[in-house]
Structures are given as C-alpha cells and as structure tokens.
Image (cartoon, rainbow, N blue to C red):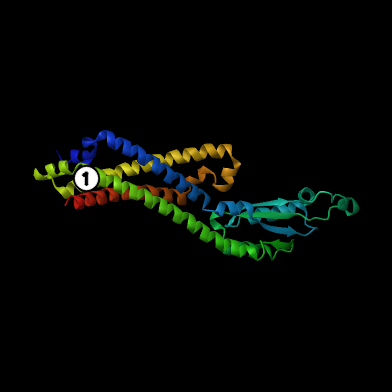
C-alpha cells in the first residue's frame, strides 16, 4: 500500500461501517454547531436581558418633541447603545392607561400629566455595569433630563449574575463537546483494534506504524473539519428559517446575519479548527489505546 493510499486506509478496509460512523458524527457535530451558534448569537443571556431591560431618561415636561428626538439620536450614537427611542407624552399616556385602566379621568381634569422619555437599550455584548455608568454619565448633566432610571440597586446584581450564567452555558457546551470527543475516541479505538491485524501486516512489510497513525489522524482531522463546516451551514440555515417565522427566536437568540460580523467569524473559525484538531486527536488516542490493549 502506498503512502498516499494509507491516508484513507480505514475507508479501504471498512467503507460501509465508516460511512455509518461518519453519518453519526455529522449528527453530533450538528448538535454542537446548533448550540455553538446559539451561544455566539445570544451571548448567553445578554441578548435577552438587553431586550427586556432598559435605561429610561425621563425628560422635563417643558422639553419639546423635536428636542427629545435630538437627545435620543445623540444617545444612540454612544458606543454601548444599541437603540435609543424617544416617546412623547402621548405615547407615555397610552402606555400608562394600558397598564392602569380606569385612570383616564386624570387627564380630563388636568391634561396629560406625563412627560416624554427616552428608552435606551444597550448592545448585548456591551451589557455591563461600566456601560450603564457611561450612558448615565452622558445623560445626567443634561438639563432636559429630569430623572434617570437604570434599574436601581438590583441592576448591578443582575449584571454580575448574568456573567456566571453565561459562564455556566459555555461550561455546559464544553462538557458536551468533551462527551462527543470521548465518543469519537472510543470509535477510533474500536476501529483501530478491528483492523490491528491489517496494520501489523503492513508494518511487517515496511510501512511505518507512526506514519500510518499520523496519516490516519490527518485524514480524520480533515473529515472532522468538513463535517463541522457542513454542520455550521445547516445550523445557520435552520436559524434563518426559525428567525423568519418567530420574533421570539430573534429576541432571545438573535438575527443570523450577525454571524457575518468579524468577531463572530473569528469564533466560527475557532470552532472549525477545534473540530478538526479534536477529531485528529481522537484518532491518535484511539490508535494508541488499541495498540496498548493488543499488547
């Protein structure tokens, strides 16, 4: 057997069994890819919190609508801010009466008692105590701002807690990846043990045992990278379909086009490289374990 053909020796020895094994690995990679993309897009609980929690700048009653919109536009330009929307007194009154039915008589007695306000949502990746403080520092000196609501004493606690929750999500993903890696290693060991006699036959005729192990590992790494790439594409396509049909998915996970951002592309590249390297490592571990068992 030539050095070139030994790259794919497992496919030559048991193509049917390896095809079924590869199909199973594709399913496992798809699960990993779906979890990974969800974490990348959502930032854990960051996106959910950024949608549900807002900084509110309550303006003075005397602030006209044009000035309120101008303040919102300037706040929207701050680096941590994803959106800043001005809502006038009429919008505030509608929200108030929707939350507390039966208070319409207050307006009949003395007009609209509510001022306009600016509702500010931070970017998911910038949701932190420092970002809240920077936005608050930009708004407090403005004479048009009557009161600034940032979540009170509970906000810092929630922001600190979300770091631990995000860390737990990534730890769970790492454990899932480690479990799949162990599955790959067991499969590789079983296959290497099954073909031990064939490898010994080749070694007796001059084939390098170390060379066969490295070439098998390199071929497995290549296949792992390809399977990871296919899984990422399938998972991203699935999120595109879900996103077009569910606003809940967009608010919790996030819009799939954000995967094209430089930071996200870097993480996707790391996923592909890790999948390839771990697949190759599983092949080497399986080979060594099979040889040790044979001895």
Examine the rendered structure and indicate whether residue 76 appears above or below residue 257: below
Which residue in the structure is indicated by mark 1?
193
- Residue 242 visible to the viewer: yes
Q: Is residue 89 left or right of residue 192?
A: right
Residue sitting at the far left: 205
Given residues 217 and 17, the one toward you in this image is: 17
Q: Measuring 71% from the left and 52% from the top, which residue is drawn there? A: 86
Q: Name the spot of residue 255 as percent of width and height, x first.
A: 54, 44
- Residue 273 visible to the viewer: no
Image quadrant containing the N terminus: top left
Examine the rendered structure and indicate whether residue 91 appears above or below residue 78: above
Q: Name the spot of residue 206 as percent of width and height, x first.
A: 9, 45
Q: Name the spot of residue 238 as percent of width and height, x first.
A: 49, 38
Report helix, strand or loop for mark 1.
Answer: helix
Q: Is residue 262 left or right of residue 282?
A: right
Residue sitting at the far right: 109
Q: Is residue 211 left or right of residue 109?
A: left
Q: Name the spot of residue 217 as percent of width and height, x first.
A: 25, 47
């Amino acid at each position: 057997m030539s050095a070139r053909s030994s790259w794919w020796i497992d496919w030559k020895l048991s193509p049917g069994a390896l095809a079924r094994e590869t199909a199973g690995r594709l399913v496992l990679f798809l699960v990993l890819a779906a979890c990974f993309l969800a974490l990348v897009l959502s930032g854990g609980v960051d996106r959910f919190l950024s949608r549900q929690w807002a900084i509110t700048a309550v303006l003075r009653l005397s602030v006209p609508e044009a000035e309120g919109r101008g303040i919102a536009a300037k706040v929207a330009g701050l680096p941590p801010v994803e959106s800043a929307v001005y809502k006038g007194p009429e919008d505030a009154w509608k929200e108030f009466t929707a939350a507390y039915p039966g208070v319409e008589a207050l307006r009949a007695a003395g007009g609209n008692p509510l001022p306009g306000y600016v509702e500010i949502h931070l970017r998911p990746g910038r949701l932190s105590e420092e970002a809240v403080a920077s936005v608050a520092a930009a708004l407090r000196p403005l004479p048009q701002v009557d009161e600034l609501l940032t979540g009170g004493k509970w906000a810092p606690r929630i922001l600190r807690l979300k770091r631990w929750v995000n860390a737990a999500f990534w730890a769970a993903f790492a454990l899932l990846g480690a479990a799949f890696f162990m599955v790959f290693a067991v499969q590789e060991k079983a296959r290497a043990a099954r073909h031990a006699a064939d490898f010994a036959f080749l070694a007796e005729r001059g084939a390098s045992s170390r060379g066969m192990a490295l070439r098998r590992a390199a071929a497995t790494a290549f296949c792992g990278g390809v399977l990871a790439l296919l899984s990422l594409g399938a998972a991203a396509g699935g999120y595109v379909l879900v996103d077009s049909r569910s606003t809940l998915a967009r608010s919790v996970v996030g819009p799939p086009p954000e995967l094209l951002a430089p930071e996200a592309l870097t993480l996707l590249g790391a996923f592909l490289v890790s999948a390839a390297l771990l697949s190759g490592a599983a092949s080497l571990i399986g080979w060594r374990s099979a040889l040790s068992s044979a001895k």
